[in-house]
Structure formats: C-alpha cells, structure tokens
Image (cartoon, rainbow, N blue to C red):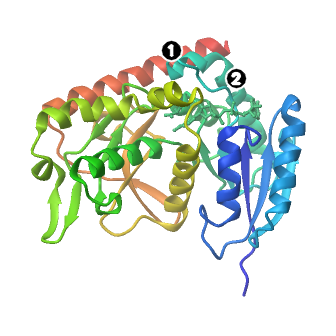
Amino acid sequence: MAKEPVRVLVTGAAGQIGYALVPMIARGVMLGADQPVILHMLDIPPAAEALNGVKMELVDAAFPLLKGVVATTDVVEACTGVNVAVMVGGFPRKEGMERKDVMSKNVSIYKSQASALEQHAAPNCKVLVVANPANTNALILKEFAPSIPAKNITCLTRLDHNRALGQISEKLNVQVSDVKNVIIWGNHSSSQYPDVNHATVMTPSGEKPVRELVKDDAWLNGEFITTVQQRGAAIIKARKLSSALSAASAACDHIRDWVLGTPEGTWVSMGVYSDGSYNAPAGVIYSFPVTCKNGEWTIVQGLAIDEFSRKKLDLTGQELTEEKELAYSCLS
Ligand code: NAD
Ligand code: LMR
C-alpha cells in the first residue's frame, strides 16, 4: 500500500539553499525513495515572485513522489500540518563576518516562527534549524515554542561532520564512505571542535583508527581542525556566496538519519538540546555524537575525552553560553 505523504516545510525556500534542497526532498533523498512528500515553501513578500518560480520548476520537474506544493508568504499556512520543518530562512553572512554577526536579524525571525510552528505544525514535528547562528536560532525557537518537546528541535552540524569526513578521505586517499565516527562538538562556528579521536577507516584488513593511518598528529591537531572550522568562510571567499549544495545535502542526511536511523556502529553529529553530557553547558543547543533509532536521537555516552579535547569542548561551550546571552539581549 502506498505511504501517506509527509509534509515538509522549507523556510527561505526562494534562497540558494532552498533552491538546492527542494528538488532533493522531492526526489526522496531526505525521506526515502518510497516516501511521497508535500512541500510547504515559505519566503518573505519581496521573494514571492521568485518563490512562485521555484514552484513552477517543481511542477515542471514532474517528480513522482511530489504530491503537492504550498508556496506562500503566510507563516501560518506554511506551518500548518507539517511533519518536518527545515528552517533555512534568514540572512547569510558575507565575507569577513562571523556567523554570530547575523544574530540580531535572525534570532527575531526564530522567535516569531516558533509560535507559528508550535500552534500549527503536526504533533511530533521534527525541526532542523539551518540558518545562522544555527545553534542559537534553534535555542530561541525552542524557548519560544515551549510545547514542542526539546528533543524535536535540532540544528545542522552535519555539514561540518561531512566536511571532516571529506578532509580525512582526501588526506588518506580513501573512499569517504569508508570513513566514519568523526565528531563535531559544540557550535556551528569557528569555535567548533572536529574530533577524530574515535574515527575509523574501513581498510582491506579491517577497521583502523584514523590517527593510526594518518600518522601525523600535528596535521590532525592543527590544519585539519582549522580547515573544517574555516570551511564555510573559504566557500564564501571562493563563491562570494555561502555553501548551498553541501548544506542542502547535509540537511537531507540529518533528517534521513533522524527519521530512518543511523547504521549499526555509526554515529553522526547533530546540534541538540544539551543535558550537560560530557560536561557541556546544559540548556544550549550543542553538537554531540548521536545515534538515531525509531525517530529519536540519543547522545553517544562514555567516549574518552583527552586534555586537548576537553579544552576545545569547553571553549565552544563557552561561546554558546555567550551567544545565548547575546540573543536574549537582541530580543529585549
Ligand atoms: P539566501 O539569502 O540565499 O536565502 C535565504 C532566504 O531566506 C531568502 O530567500 C530570504 O528571502 C528568506 N528569508 C528571510 N527572512 C525570512 C523569513 N522571516 N521567513 C522566511 N524566509 C525568510 O541564503 P542561503 O544561502 O540560502 O542561506 C540561508 C541561511 O543558512 C543563512 O543564515 C546561512 O548562513 C545559513 N547556512 C547554514 C549552514 C549550516 O551548516 N548550518 C550552511 C549554509 C548556510
Ligand atoms: C557554512 O558553514 O558554510 C555556513 O554556515 C555558511 C557560513 O556562513 O559559513
């Protein structure tokens, strides 16, 4: 029997990430090749004509899984009945800015959209915040939508996770699909900590630790980390626009693994509401290693954290605590 369609909201759908993301969702990349979808696309009135153009292209693409398209500038209409909400709407940073420099513009959007989601989304709607500062926008959404369970509100650090996999795969000249269990800790900002201490590579003679294969701790503790931390800025410098296809692809990975589960023995990074695991600050959205099963994420527990890592986990946690204060001061 054919499955019922899932309603997926994409805010900022007329923007660059939106344009890359909606065809992926309509092709089944996010929810599976047998899962029909109805797309809800929201943007603001100045982008209404462009949004309508995206809708026309979706019709023209004749995607078999796409059972309907709602394209609107009305936030209530956009949020009504959605099962998955991918929050991309907002303003991207430009060259020379940190992601928190777009804070005042973007957190107020997340405060107002929180209520619309809370009142009109389907029960148990899963929310992924992509717009920057992603962790703090997600926290504001959570705080102003108190009836949505905190575990349903997450932010995207899967792009950073995938970037870390990509760097290791290039360094070792191995398939990216053979590398696993990197971790992004903390903030989706230049303070994030990409950690390879538990990462492995599948080789013809079995699974081997990344550190053993790379044999270059100076690179792993230096250039590797800064490359991943600064990759967003490097893309902006090269494209004069922030990452879009990789961000859209990572958003699909995030939701797919959350809904359909992570493979056995594999974890992924997600920004989730912190319970203080690994002595990260509680009450912020912090990126942790998680596994997912039956539509629920669980933080991987018990990983050893060495002194070098401890300092980095604390630093990015401290930045999130400061961002939280800054966000509230922007909203007052
Ligand atoms: P963009 O400017 O191309 O598109 C953003 C869209 O959001 C625009 O169409 C704009 O009209 C719309 N918008 C603005 N305010 C809105 C509102 N109140 N409601 C609905 N829509 C609204 O930007 P982009 O390149 O698509 O990036 C979007 C966001 O994602 C930025 O904040 C960017 O920094 C962030 N980003 C995050 C990651 C990540 O890994 N977390 C990766 C890439 C980009
Ligand atoms: C990214 O990581 O590519 C995005 O967050 C965009 C940015 O501002 O870096």
Mark toward the viewer: 2 or 1: 1
Q: Position of residue 63 (x, y in %)?
A: 76, 68
> 34 left or right of 303?
right
Q: Position of residue 25 (x, y in %)?
A: 67, 59
Label 2 close to label 1 by CB (< 8 Å)? no
Query: Residue 316 falls in which quadrant of the image?
Result: top left
Please tell me the numbered disc located at residue 108. 2
Residue at the image point whose x is 64% and y is 24% from the top: 107
**Number of residue marks:** 2
Q: Is residue 171 above or below residue 279?
A: below
Residue at the image point whose x is 71% and y is 62% from the top: 26
Would you say residue 87 is visible in this rendering? no
Looking at the rendered structure, the kind of residue marked 1 is Gly
Other residues around mark 2 within 10 Å, as few (<14) / some (14–19) / many (≥20): many
Residue at the image point whose x is 46% and y is 44% from the top: 159
> 277 left or right of 237?
left
Q: Position of residue 114 (x, y in %)?
A: 71, 36
The front one of 318 and 56 is 56
Look at mark 1 in the image and give the residue it sits on: 96
Mark 1 residue element = loop
User: Which quadrant would the N terminus be assigned to in this image?
Assistant: bottom right
Looking at the rendered structure, the kind of residue marked 2 is Ser
Q: Position of residue 100 (x, y in %)?
A: 53, 19
The front one of 20 and 259 is 20
User: Which quadrant would the C terminus be assigned to in this image?
Assistant: top right
Q: How far is disc 2 from disc 1 in space, using C-alphas?
A: 23 Å
> 2 left or right of 60?
left
Whichever of callouts 2 and 1 sits on the residue coming sooner in the sequence is 1
